[in-house]
Image: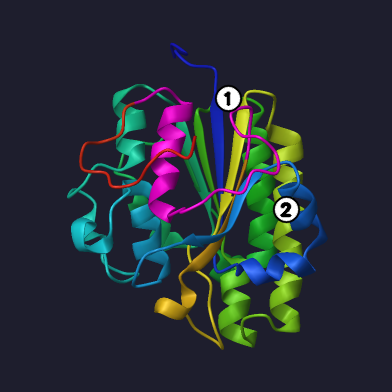
Amino acid sequence: MNIVNDQKVILIVTDGMDPAAIEHVPKAKEFMKDCAYALDAKTVIPAITMPCHVSLFKSVDPEKHGCFDNYDPGYYNKVKAMTDIFHRRDRRSAMFYTWGELRDLAKPGSMAYDCFVSGYYNGIEKATKELTDKAIDYLNNNFTSFTFFHHDLIDSHGHGFGWMSEKYIEACNFVWDEIYRLVDAAADENTTVIIVSDHSGHDHDHCDERDVTIPLMIRGKDFKAGTVLKDVSIKDVAPTILKILDLVPDEAWEGKALY
């Protein structure tokens, strides 16, 4: 493969992590010190996993990409996703996830590597650790411009035990242990790490205006540590990644680059 840009991005989604949980997660607080960040970034409505992820990848609201629930893959041809642009410009990308529906985020054939370990059949904790191992091995042996890594455990414990419950906070700490393991092993001086949630939550669920405030952290050479980012949307993530990789966003996109 002809490497036309030596910059790399690792995008980690902490599904369902509320910004308020960071105060209870020492590693999240430590990591944030080296980041530009926003603890009041906004996601889209409905604040549901798949619509939020499609808006993340396509930088438009659900009204434009057509995804309003977790189980309808028919939307993916309506607006170009960032993975479509990577594929057209010969930028190698990879996905690692334990929730199978996320396979529909990228068109078939657009990813260099797609790794799914079922959290349902293997247990989410075991699947997450296995997925981290696979990601470390792959990234240390393959130049990868864009890597997407999804953590489902926090959201699962939010639904099962309640947002901000003791078990929910335990899940947040477990996920951040795995984030450190991945970043410490696979990120170098040319790697920008973006950590963002797709939605927050309340009680045992999420979907509406109560659940749209999310954390976002960016660590990389283009971002000054300690900078508080203003007016941030989940739709800004894809334009930011494309700017880092020296690519042009799709003209239909609504978000902005964050630097």
Element type at marker 1? Answer: loop
Q: Position of residue 168 (x, y in %)?
A: 69, 77
Compared with residue 3, is residue 148 higher up or lower down, i.e. above or below? below
Q: CA distance from mark 2 to mark 1?
A: 20 Å
Q: Position of residue 35 (x, y in %)?
A: 67, 43
Q: Which residues are magenta?
A: 219-247
Q: Position of residue 201 (x, y in %)?
A: 53, 78
**Residue labelled with disc 2:** 178
Q: Is residue 207 visible?
A: no
In which image quadrant can residue 176 be found?
bottom right
Kindly check if marks 2 and 1 are in contact, taking CB atoms under 8 A apart as contact.
no
**Residue labelled with disc 1:** 142
Q: Position of residue 107 (x, y in %)?
A: 29, 44
Tag 1 or tag 2, which sits nearer the N-term? Answer: 1
What residue lies at 54% left-to-right and 83% top-to-bottom? 202
What residue lies at 28% left-to-right and 47% top-to-bottom? 254
Element type at marker 2? Answer: helix
Label of residue 202 in the image: none
Circle 1 Cα neighbour tier, 10 Å, few/some/many (<14 / 14–19 / ≥20): few
**Amino acid on which disc 2 is placed:** Glu
What residue lies at 70% left-to-right and 84% top-to-bottom? 165
Q: Please tell me whether residue 246 belongs to the stretch shown in magenta.
A: yes
Q: How many marks?
A: 2
Q: Nearer the viewer, residue 196 or 116?
A: 196
In which image quadrant can residue 44 be found?
bottom left
Q: Nearer the viewer, mark 2 or mark 1?
A: 2
Instruction: Please state if 40 lies on the left or on the right of 73 as rendered.
Output: right
Q: Is residue 177 visible?
A: yes
Compared with residue 109, is residue 166 higher up or lower down, i.e. above or below? below
Q: Please tell me whether residue 9 belongs to the stretch shown in magenta.
A: no
**Amino acid on which disc 1 is placed:** Asn
In which image quadrant can residue 102 be found?
bottom left
